[in-house]
């Protein structure tokens, strides 16, 4: 029943079904898990005589008259008078002639909306109405769920479909996920009740309990999946433990000394951590996090070097062929003076297969593991910018009797709490320091009142030969570039060209331009033929322009942390001191705490931590988050809650057998492999 496809929904247009499917809703069950993001509390019925302006209210009354009038301008106005025991009110709709067919005199009606003064009296700006007539009311007169609306699919439609589906289910239809005993012991709301209450709460208290229950389930399966992977991992033994004797030590330190630079303190620390791991019998499962440019590749190279000196092979997997080729090249340079062989294996270059040669290091895409011919000597697997090392890939190696050490590297910052709960199987290393010589980008919040001075300062810098990016704000809350943001950028470009930057050369760049035009603009900017580049936030500026030292973010308060961080990274590529100016809009004359924090911190991880702490329930700040974006209800920033659920998982692992809980087992399995399944 739960798996019924949504295209069987009665009285539902093909268009609506297509829109639901676009949201990822394919079955009744999917729809039940499409949760409201807020509720309008309209459960109290207000007497008409006691209405006050600006209140959001519900009234119940009898329709006295309903008129449909044509105005002189050819519009249609629907006017309805409604009375209850305390008074009367007139309500108006515009151009909804069909309403006269539905709202008829004598009918009992419920209306919700905001009270407004109108011609010396009060009216209600109606957001919803329902004919009472013994019907259950779902759009008014209750705590009304409000759903995220996308592309013309209204909250009202979703609410109606939800109501229909919930009415179909007898209580027994929805199978529990967790053991009954645990539900009782932790005073959780039963799942079937929680699903009703999360959509149509009968009180605020029950709503809270329902959200807690659903959030618990979400987090429970994720933590359980992670713990099981961890347990499984700990039970493994590497085929052959590595040793770091004096000979290996000598070679490795020569390699490090011969580098054209000195390792940063952070890099040295990570090398120590990894070196310790490699000598253990338990395979390493380490996660290395460091901003772009922090120098992760060299860490992988050092680990691979130790591995090779122990007579074992290293596989390095990059997400794309281009990146694989880049790694191949930089590793070849790094190891040019050593007796370490490096191979490249991508879809187009099948060196391994044709030559049947075994390299010390093989670089390729993630298909390496499943395709590689010989895996017996693999001692280390390095995964760059990829998600977790999946169960599937490990199984492929295990089949061949190999349990390698694994190092996963990423520039995506993942908050500590997330690491500890959802990725608990991983040990974490962090590079929180950039190589020497890179200057911190000075960041300033510039409120409206200081904007003129800001422009003057920029002009001075331009006179000294610097170049500037001006990034226009997001117009809509989507990540994709819309026509609207293209228009806004174009308008800003015209405006600046004719006012502030009359005497400078300007360029415009946005995603709707032809590739050739884009290239021309970029080339001009790179060659210094243009002082200021006005662009939209999403357009990928592919070329490093080291002479561009200033980036202005217009409407800075509208960008998410991750996006601010990414945009700021466009400057500071060269020797010169770089600047990031956060221009805020009218209503933000006082900079928000968030922007001030951003202006004072520069590592991705610090920013992600901040974002994480301040993330409201179900709220997403722009860019896709990493690994926890599909938690719809569970609040990971609620430490008490996270602790409680973690303890429940511990309890479950001791007292219950997962295989006796089929539904749970099935979901847990999707979580322990889902990262890989996405590829
Ligand atoms: P990422 O962490 O983004 O993968 P890379 O490993 O590609 O960064 O390193 C970026 C650049 O910094 C490379 O050119 C690398 O040679 C250089 N680099 C790495 N470590 C240092 C260091 N300690 N000092 C100076 N330059 C370094
Ligand atoms: Mg890298």
Image (cartoon, rainbow, N blue to C red):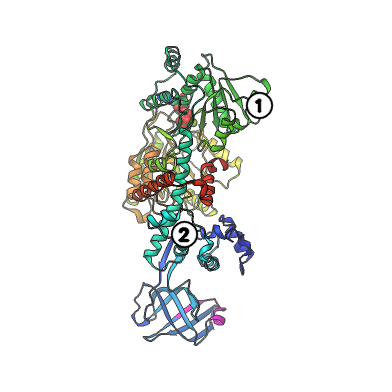
Tag in front: 2 or 1: 2
Near-viewer residue (258 or 491): 258
In the image: residue 435, left or right of residue 18: left
Give the image location of residue 523, x and y in percent.
54, 35
Rendering quarter of residue 604? top left
Say if 550 sits above or below 315 in the image: below
The residue tagged 1 is 350
The residue tagged 2 is 191
The answer to whether mark 1 is within 8 Å of ligand 2 is no
Give the image location of residue 572, x and y in percent.
41, 33
Q: Is residue 95 one of those drawn in magenta? A: yes
Secondary structure type for disc 1: loop
Give the image location of residue 564, x and y in percent.
42, 44
Mark 1 is surrounded, within 10 Å at the Cα level, by few (under 14), some (14 to 19) or many (20 or more) other residues, namely some
- The N terminus: image quadrant: bottom right
Rendering quarter of residue 250? top left
Q: Which residues are magenta?
A: 91-102
Near-viewer residue (55 or 215): 215
Rendering quarter of residue 569? top left
The residue depicted at 38 percent of the width and 86 percent of the height is 85
Say if 50 sits above or below 144 in the image: below
Give the image location of residue 160, x and y in percent.
53, 68
Is residue 451 at least partly visible in the picture? Answer: no
Q: Could you give the CA–CA distance between mark 2 and mark 1, rounded to whole angstroms?
A: 52 Å
- The C terminus: image quadrant: top right
Say if 529 sits above or below 173 in the image: above
Near-viewer residue (316 or 293): 316
Is residue 152 at least partly visible in the picture? Answer: yes
Near-viewer residue (187 or 254): 187
């Amino acid at each position: 029943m739960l798996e019924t496809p949504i295209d069987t929904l009665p009285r539902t247009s093909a268009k609506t079904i297509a829109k639901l499917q676009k949201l990822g809703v394919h079955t009744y069950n999917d729809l039940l898990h499409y949760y409201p993001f807020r509720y309008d509390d309209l459960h109290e019925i207000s007497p008409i005589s006691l209405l006050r302006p600006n209140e959001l209210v519900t009234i119940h009354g009898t329709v006295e008259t309903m008129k449909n009038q044509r105005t002189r301008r050819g519009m249609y106005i629907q006017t309805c008078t409604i009375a209850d025991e305390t008074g009367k009110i007139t309500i108006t709709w515009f151009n909804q002639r069909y309403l006269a067919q539905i709202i008829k005199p004598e009918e009992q009606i419920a209306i919700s909306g905001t009270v407004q003064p109108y011609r010396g009296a009060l009216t209600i700006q109606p957001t919803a109405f329902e004919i009472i007539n013994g019907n259950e009311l779902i759009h008014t007169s209750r705590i009304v769920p409000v759903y995220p609306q996308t592309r013309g699919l209204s909250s009202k439609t979703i609410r109606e479909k939800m109501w229909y589906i919930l009415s179909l289910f007898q209580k027994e239809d929805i199978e529990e996920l967790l053991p009954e005993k645990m539900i009782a012991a932790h005073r959780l709301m039963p799942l079937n009740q929680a699903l009703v209450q999360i959509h149509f709460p009968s009180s605020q208290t029950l709503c809270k309990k329902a959200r807690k229950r659903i959030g618990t389930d979400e987090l429970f399966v994720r933590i359980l999946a992670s713990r099981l992977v961890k347990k499984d991992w700990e039970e493994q033994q590497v085929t052959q433990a590595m040793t770091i004797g004096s000979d290996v030590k000598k070679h490795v330190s020569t390699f490090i000394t011969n580098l054209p630079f000195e390792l940063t303190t952070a890099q040295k620390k990570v090398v120590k951590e990894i070196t310790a791991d490699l000598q253990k019998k338990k395979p390493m499962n380490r996660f290395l996090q460091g901003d772009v440019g922090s120098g992760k590749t060299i860490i992988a190279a050092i680990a691979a070097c130790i591995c090779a000196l122990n007579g074992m092979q290293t596989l390095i997997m990059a997400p794309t062929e281009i990146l694989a080729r880049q790694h191949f090249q930089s590793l070849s340079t790094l190891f040019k003076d050593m007796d370490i062989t490096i191979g490249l294996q991508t879809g187009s270059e099948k060196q391994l297969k044709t030559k049947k040669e075994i390299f010390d290091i093989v670089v390729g895409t993630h298909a390496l593991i499943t395709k590689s011919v010989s895996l017996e000597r693999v001692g280390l697997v390095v995964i760059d910018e990829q998600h977790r090392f999946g169960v599937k890939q490990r199984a492929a190696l295990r089949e061949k009797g190999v349990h390698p050490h694994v190092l996963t590297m990423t520039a995506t910052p993942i908050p500590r709490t997330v690491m500890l709960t959802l990725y608990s199987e991983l040990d974490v290393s962090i590079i929180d320091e950039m190589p020497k010589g890179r200057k911190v980008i000075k960041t300033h919040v510039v409120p409206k009142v200081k904007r003129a001075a800001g422009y003057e300062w920029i002009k001075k810098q331009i006179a000294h030969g610097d170049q500037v990016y001006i990034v226009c704000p997001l117009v809509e809350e989507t990540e994709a570039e819309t026509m609207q943001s293209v228009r806004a950028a174009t308008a800003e470009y015209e405006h600046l060209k004719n006012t502030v930057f009359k005497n400078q050369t300007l360029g415009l760049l946005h995603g709707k331009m032809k590739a050739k035009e884009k290239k021309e603009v970029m080339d001009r900017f790179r060659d210094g033929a243009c002082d200021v580049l006005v662009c939209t936030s999403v357009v990928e500026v592919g070329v490093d322009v080291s002479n561009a030292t200033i980036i202005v973010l217009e409407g800075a308060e509208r960008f998410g942390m991750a996006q601010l961080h990414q945009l700021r990274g466009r400057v500071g590529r060269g020797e010169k001191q770089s600047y990031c100016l956060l221009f805020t809009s009218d209503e933000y004359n006082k900079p928000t705490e968030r922007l001030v924090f951003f202006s004072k911190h520069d590592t991705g991880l610090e920013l992600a931590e901040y974002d994480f702490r301040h993330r409201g329930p179900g709220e997403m700040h722009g860019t896709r988050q990493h690994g926890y974006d599909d938690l719809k209800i569970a609040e990971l920033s609620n430490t008490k809650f996270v602790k409680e659920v973690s303890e429940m998982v511990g309890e479950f692992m001791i007292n219950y057998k997962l295989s006796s809980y089929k539904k749970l087992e099935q979901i847990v399995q999707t979580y322990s492999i889902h990262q890989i399944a996405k590829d």
